[in-house]
Image (cartoon, grey):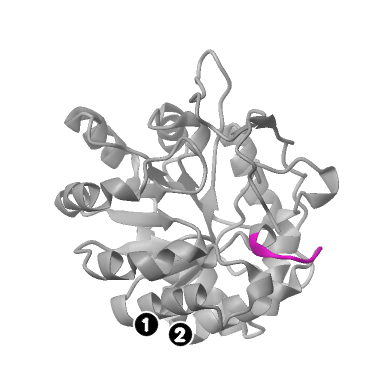
Amino acid sequence: MFHYDGTIRDCLPPRRASPPRRLQVPPGAWETHAHVIGVPPDHPLVPDRHFTAPAAPPADFIAMLDRVGLAYGVLVQVSAHGTDNRLLLEALRRYPDRLRGVAVVDAATPDAVIAELKDAGVTGIRILDIVGGGVGMRSLEALADRCAELGWHIQVAVKGPSYSELEPRLARLRVPFIIDHMGWCPAPAGIAQPDFQAVLRLVRDTGCYVKLSGGFRLSGEPKPFRDTYAFARALIAAAPDRMVWGSDWPHVGLYDAEERPDVGELLDGLADYTSDPGMQRRILVDNPARFYGLPHG
């Protein structure tokens, strides 16, 4: 299972992606969870970050999409850059026909910056309470009000034990929200654990979406992370029209070369979550297109 120990460590670059072998990627498929990363001095790193990652420029991300056969991508502002969304903005402007974005903002982010982000293709913000550098749940309601004015969604990134407590707050949101990494519940504890059951209730009762991503961070097993299959299958069964897939490229916070996932293998993992090509298409094509809106040049 994936752990942060609170110290700043140098993590590894991503493994080169290979095309999937078992899953036939449908035309128009999306990758909904990835990051671009810059290096100082052009792109400063926040002091409270939990890792220092090598550069992961926009061109490398597009090349990865092309290698595995994905048409579109959603770039999520990486925690190490805090609320400095400039590299995200650069990527969206460079590839307007391929990318959507999820930014990180706070109460001090000027309206002019927000307008710039929206114009470039940002469709939401991320609330992050897992590693340093994010804007946390204490700002949820205030930022939700701002998102409501913009037509944006909120991406929720908290660990599983938080969901039971947060369930009432999330249920009251008046903006769409999406849960990343299947709810960040530890896979060895099984799907009956109260925290994952809280995630399932939110999925059933609120109309939220979920990212089928980050299995390698939740698993207590080596590849192919079989202990995560039951979680993904339960989520798909609960809301097949509100599941999307993401690779979490460039897989920050990994320090052992053998642990780095191959995006093609992660795509093949979707075939373990559901063997139905129709369902795979909904998860990879239809659902993300509905939630994020197709990019336009």
Q: Position of residue 187 (x, y in %)?
A: 65, 70
Count of numbered circles on the image: 2
Would residue 221 be counted in the magenta stretch?
A: yes
Q: Earlier in the sequence, mark 1 or mark 2?
A: 1
Tell me the kind of residue under disc 1. Answer: Arg
Q: Determine the CA span between mark 1 and mark 2.
A: 6 Å
136 lies left or right of 185: left
Mark yes or no: residue 98 visible.
Answer: no
Label for residue 258?
A: none
118 lies left or right of 163: left
Tell me the kind of residue under disc 2. Answer: Ala
Mark 1 = which residue?
204
Q: Which residues are magenta?
A: 218-222
- For residue 197, above or below residue 261: below
Q: Are marks 1 and 2 in contact (CB under 8 Å)?
A: yes
Mark 2 = which residue?
238
